């Protein structure tokens, strides 16, 4: 039996991030109002997906130094808590060393390799 289904692209800033498909075995099952409603739902879903992506990126930027690609102080504190918990859980010892070198970032600006991505 033939299927009839409208497709709505989920786009944000002219970039497609998904496709929503609704199907029916009945011809002309969807009215113009139904299609407008589906397009509105697809747009709202695309915005929500993009917002979640941006939030994830923002969280990463909050703990990773943009220049070096390494954890910043906030990231090290978050990592510290997790690693202490893990060491306790597995009954292991833990050592940590943190260097705060003034001007370190300016000395590596001209390096050829880009910073590592941790998120």
Image: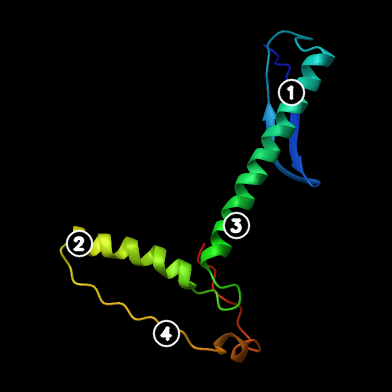
Task: Determine which residue is flagged by label 3.
Answer: 57
Compared with residue 23, is residue 109 higher up or lower down, i.e. above or below? below
Identify the element where label 2 is drawn: helix
Q: Is residue 33 above or below residue 111?
A: above
Seen in the picture, residue 56 relative to 2 is either above or below; the reply is: below
Q: Position of residue 98 (x, y in %)?
A: 39, 81
**Residue 109, image x and y in percent?**
64, 86
* Position of residue 103 in the picture relative to residue 83 (left or right): right
* Front-lying residue, 88 or 35: 88
Q: Nearer the viewer, mark 1 or mark 4?
A: 4
| Tag nearer the camera, 3 or 4 | 4
The reply to whether the C-beta atoms of the residues labelled 2 and 3 are less than 8 Å apart is no
Horizontally, residue 43 falls left or right of residue 106, namely: right
Q: Residue 38 has which mark?
A: 1
Q: Nearer the viewer, residue 7 or 101?
A: 101
| Real-space CA distance between mark 3 and mark 4, rounded to the nearest whole angstrom | 25 Å
**Residue contact at pointers 1 and 3, CB within 8 angstroms:** no
Numbered disc 3: secondary structure: helix
Q: CA distance from mark 1 to mark 4?
A: 54 Å
Mark pair 1, 3: CA separation: 29 Å
Residue position marked by numbered label 4 in the rendering: 99
Q: Position of residue 75 (x, y in %)?
A: 46, 67
Q: Nearer the viewer, mark 2 or mark 1?
A: 2
Question: Looking at the picture, how far across and down is residue 21, in whole percent?
Answer: 68, 26
- Label 4–label 2 contact, CB within 8 A: no
- Residue at (33% x, 62% y) in the render: 81
Q: Which residue is mark 2?
A: 88
Please state if 77 lies on the left or on the right of 50 as rendered: left
Residue 18: in sight, yes or no?
no
């Amino acid at each position: 039996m033939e299927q009839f289904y409208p497709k709505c692209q989920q786009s944000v800033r002219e970039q497609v991030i998904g496709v929503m498909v609704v199907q029916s075995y009945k011809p002309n099952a969807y009215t113009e109002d139904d299609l407008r409603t589906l397009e509105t739902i697809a747009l709202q879903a695309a915005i929500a997906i993009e917002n979640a992506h941006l939030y994830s990126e923002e969280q990463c930027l909050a703990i990773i130094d943009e220049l070096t690609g390494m954890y910043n102080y906030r990231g090290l504190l978050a990592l510290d808590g997790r690693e202490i918990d893990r060491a306790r859980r597995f009954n292991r010892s833990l050592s940590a060393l943190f260097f705060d070198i003034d001007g370190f970032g300016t000395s590596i600006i001209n390096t050829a390799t880009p910073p590592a991505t941790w998120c």
